[in-house]
Image (cartoon, grey):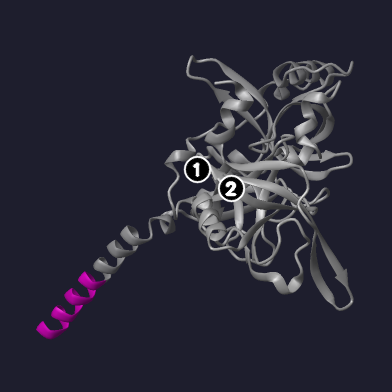
């Protein structure tokens, strides 16, 4: 009997130790499916589908921004590339571009027209406001108040919205929710993932103001003023597999060795047109570049880069953006979707992902674009 009692006590203490260890080591497991379901029900209604003529479709969300002085502003936030195909020319337009916004999480859903009132091209973030029946830009509060009177549905005056969180407080391994619409006719899609870490990605800013994201680094031998032949290419490195916070020092070392460095970029954030930027010098720790035309020659035998000589346009790698890297597999159409912490606060916004590469989804940091959209 004593042996049995000792065995029972040992098993009981072992079970207790294992239980405590599970709670300490895996705190997220304490959340039940019901908890996540309740959170989803709270944060999904403000997420919207956005369709832009000539651009495509994406996601967005209603946000109420609380400023330091206590004032609040409400609008629809999305990625700039979702609503405008040439963000750098945004300020040159006589009228803001219009897009279609569908509140598809509502039953029945509501579709409205909205104007792109702000576009922060450098941080790929845009602010939208609804357009009334007269074609005038208004506020969400006024729009839904008028719609409530028109439809005799008072519930529309309390439309749902999200709040910003502090992206500087997000740490690796933090759990996050991503909710969006992967495609123009898809249902609302939710993802639960984790932040892998922060990834700095170099961008080229041309003298004309165009912003390109660097996608490849190419080291070569040859005359900078002549086309680069395939046999002169020494190495090609795909980004974002490298941490390039020290890209100016890297370029200076390569140039000093007698080799050339070509940065191949795409129009931010998901453009398919390639642009080459040849490293020329480093001034005040900023890498200076000069454009080279680059195109991808695709045939039945494969693909090869056609790289021409330098031309006159110059630029610099002076904009180094940082993204959250997330292990959730985002899909096309989820650009502009909110990335939320488990308190339901928006801490990031989905911008791009790499097909077929696990853990290669990237989100803007809220702190990088909040001020440019809401002026605080």
Looking at the rendered structure, the number of numbered marks drawn on it comes to: 2
Q: Which mark is residue 98?
A: none
Image coordinates for residue 259, horizontal then vertical, percent: 60, 63
Q: Position of residue 282 (x, y in %)?
A: 55, 46
Residue at position x 63%, y 26% from top?
373
Q: Is 186 a magenta residue? A: no
Q: Measuring 29% from the left and 68% from the top, which residue is drawn there?
A: 18
Quadrant position of residue 336: top right
Q: Nearer the viewer, residue 291 or 73?
A: 291
The front one of 265 and 125 is 265
Residue picked out by circle 1: 285
Quadrant holding the N terminus: bottom left
Q: Main secondary structure of the magenta part?
A: helix
Q: Secondary structure at mark 2?
A: strand
**Relative height, residue 190 to residue 217 (above, below):** above
Q: Nearer the viewer, residue 135 or 25?
A: 135
Q: Name the residue rendered at 80%, 20% in the picture.
A: 147
Specify the segment rendered in magenta.
1-14
Crowding at dot 1, Cα within 10 Å, few <14 / some 14-19 / many 20+, comes out as some
Position of 340 with respect to 57 (left or right) is left
In the depicted structure, whether residue 109 falls above or below residue 64: below
Outermost residue toward the left in this view: 2
Q: Which residue is mark 2?
A: 281
Whether residue 260 can be seen here: yes
User: Where residue 349 sits in the image (x, y, percent)?
Assistant: 61, 42
Q: Is residue 3 magenta?
A: yes
Q: Quadrant of the C terminus?
A: top right
Residue 108 seen from this side: no
Left of 69 or right of it: where is 229? Answer: right
Q: Position of residue 99 (x, y in %)?
A: 83, 33
């Amino acid at each position: 009997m004593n042996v049995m009692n000792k065995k029972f006590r040992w098993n009981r203490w072992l079970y207790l130790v294992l239980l405590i260890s599970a709670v300490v080591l895996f705190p997220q497991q304490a959340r039940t499916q019901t908890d996540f379901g309740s959170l989803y029900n709270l944060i999904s209604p403000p997420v919207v589908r956005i369709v832009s003529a000539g651009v495509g479709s994406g996601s967005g969300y209603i946000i109420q921004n609380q400023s330091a002085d206590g004032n609040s502003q409400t609008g629809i936030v999305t990625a700039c590339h979702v609503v405008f195909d040439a963000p750098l020319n945004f300020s040159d337009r006589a009228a803001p571009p219009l897009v279609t916004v569908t509140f598809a999480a509502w039953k029945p859903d509501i579709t409205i027209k909205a104007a792109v009132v702000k576009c922060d091209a450098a941080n790929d973030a845009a602010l939208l406001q609804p357009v009334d029946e007269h074609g005038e830009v208004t506020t969400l509060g006024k729009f839904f108040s008028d719609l409530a009177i028109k439809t005799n549905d008072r519930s529309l005056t309390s439309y749902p919205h999200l709040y910003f969180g502090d992206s500087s407080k997000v740490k690796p391994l933090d759990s996050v929710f991503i909710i969006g619409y992967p495609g123009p006719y898809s249902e609302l899609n939710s993802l639960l993932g984790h932040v892998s870490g922060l990834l700095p990605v170099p961008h080229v800013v041309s003298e004309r103001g165009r912003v390109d994201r660097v996608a490849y680094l190419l080291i070569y031998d040859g005359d900078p003023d002549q086309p680069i032949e395939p046999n002169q290419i020494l190495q090609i490195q795909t980004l974002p597999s490298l941490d390039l916070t020290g890209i100016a020092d890297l370029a200076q070392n390569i140039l000093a060795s007698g080799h050339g460095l070509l940065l191949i970029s795409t129009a931010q954030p998901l453009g398919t047109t390639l642009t080459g930027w040849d490293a020329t010098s480093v001034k005040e720790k900023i890498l200076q570049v000069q454009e080279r035309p680059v195109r991808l020659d695709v045939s039945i035998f494969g693909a090869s880069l056609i790289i021409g000589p330098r031309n006159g346009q110059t630029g610099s790698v002076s904009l180094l953006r940082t993204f959250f890297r997330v292990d959730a597999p985002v899909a096309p159409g989820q650009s502009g979707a909110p990335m939320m912490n488990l308190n339901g606060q928006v801490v990031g916004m989905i911008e791009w992902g790499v097909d077929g590469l696990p853990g290669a989804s990237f989100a803007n940091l809220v702190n990088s674009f909040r001020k440019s959209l809401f002026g605080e």
